[in-house]
Image (cartoon, grey):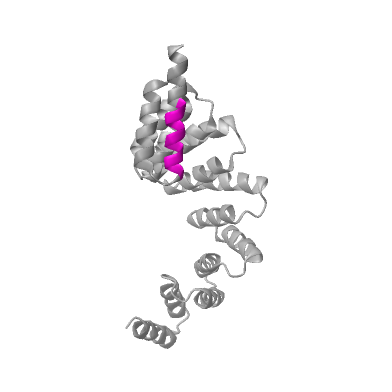
């Protein structure tokens, strides 16, 4: 009878915590989750909700600890592994994040969030071939996925496979001709293959779409100089300096 009363009270505190979290009041939410777990320490969802609240407060280590508590009670829920991995990723602890994403994929091999985050984590530690494999798997599940194509293209560039990377960025541009990031990276690939004339066309597209793009002008100047068009490069630099005034 006492346990039943405690469980009901814990559920009430948890519901209050979720209500506060929904209203972006995460500090208050955590206090309610702590009250709830004190009454019912075997409710895994309390720790999960607490971890999400810590994550929203950018308190990643505490979030990880909360998800670990949830996993002690149930290590078969892919959400707990996924969010623990994401928090490790946010901390820059990519080698700790990857095994978490692997655990998600053992439970749910088609989990897109795990595949995407694993691919990004692998890229961060320069394991680009494995990263490409993750994004290829996503593209098998969702052909034409823009984020997967873009991230795959970046990893292929790191592997110096510019031809394949060009294919990724062109595929994105078939879907959205106004994607300035895809034009920029396509230009970078073309410049790496000594096709600076075509690269400049890409950089000009970027400038038309996003005139304040941070890197495109330097990239275009470098291409102009590679083509021996030093006067045009100097004019572009001078124009940029005037625009910055």
**x%, y% of residue 97?**
43, 38
Q: Residue at x 65, y 63 (%)?
A: 175
Q: Main secondary structure of the magenta part?
A: helix
Q: Evaluate whether residue 168 shows in this view.
A: yes
The residues colored magenta run: 11-22
In this rendering, the count of numbered labels is 0
Residue 131 in the figure: left or right of residue 36: right
Answer whether residue 13 is magenta in the image: yes
Q: Residue at x 52, y 65 (%)?
A: 181
Q: Residue at x 57, y 59 (%)?
A: 165
Q: Quadrant of the C terminus?
A: bottom left
Answer whether residue 43 is magenta in the image: no
Residue 201 in the figure: left or right of residue 87: right
Relative to residue 95, is residue 230 depicted above or below? below
**x%, y% of residue 213?**
44, 71
Relative to residue 235, is residue 184 depicted above or below? above
Residue sticking out furthest to the top: 1
Q: Nearer the viewer, residue 7 or 68?
A: 7
Q: Nearer the viewer, residue 69 or 231?
A: 69
Residue 31 in the figure: left or right of residue 165: left
Q: Nearer the viewer, residue 62 or 7?
A: 7
Specify the quadrant of the image occupied by residue 85: top left
Relative to residue 145, is residue 71 depicted above or below? above
**x%, y% of residue 94?**
41, 41
Q: Evaluate whether residue 94 shows in this view.
A: no
**x%, y% of residue 203?**
51, 74
Specify the quadrant of the image occupied by residue 37: top left
């Amino acid at each position: 009878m006492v346990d039943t009363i405690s469980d009901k009270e814990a559920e009430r505190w948890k519901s209050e915590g979720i209500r506060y979290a929904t209203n972006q009041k995460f500090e208050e939410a955590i206090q309610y989750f702590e009250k709830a777990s004190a009454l019912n320490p075997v409710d895994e969802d309390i720790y999960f909700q607490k971890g999400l609240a810590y994550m929203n407060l950018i308190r990643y280590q505490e979030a990880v600890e909360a998800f670990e508590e949830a996993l002690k009670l149930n290590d078969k829920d892919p959400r707990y592994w996924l969010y623990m991995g994401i928090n490790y990723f946010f901390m820059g602890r990519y080698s700790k994040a990857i095994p978490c994403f692997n655990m998600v994929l053992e439970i749910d091999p088609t989990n897109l969030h795990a595949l995407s985050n694993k691919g990004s984590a692998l890229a961060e530690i320069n394991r680009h071939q494995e990263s490409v494999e993750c994004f290829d798997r996503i593209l098998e599940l969702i052909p034409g996925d823009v984020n997967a194509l873009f991230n795959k293209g970046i990893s292929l560039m790191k592997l110096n496979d510019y031809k394949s990377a060009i294919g990724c960025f062109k595929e994105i541009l078939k879907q959205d001709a106004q994607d300035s990031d895809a034009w920029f990276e396509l230009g970078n690939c073309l410049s790496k293959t000594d096709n600076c004339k075509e690269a400049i066309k890409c950089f000009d597209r970027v400038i038309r779409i996003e005139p304040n793009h941070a890197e495109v002008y330097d990239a275009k100047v470098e291409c102009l100089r590679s083509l021996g068009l030093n006067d045009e490069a100097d004019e572009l630099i001078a124009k940029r300096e005037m625009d910055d005034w």
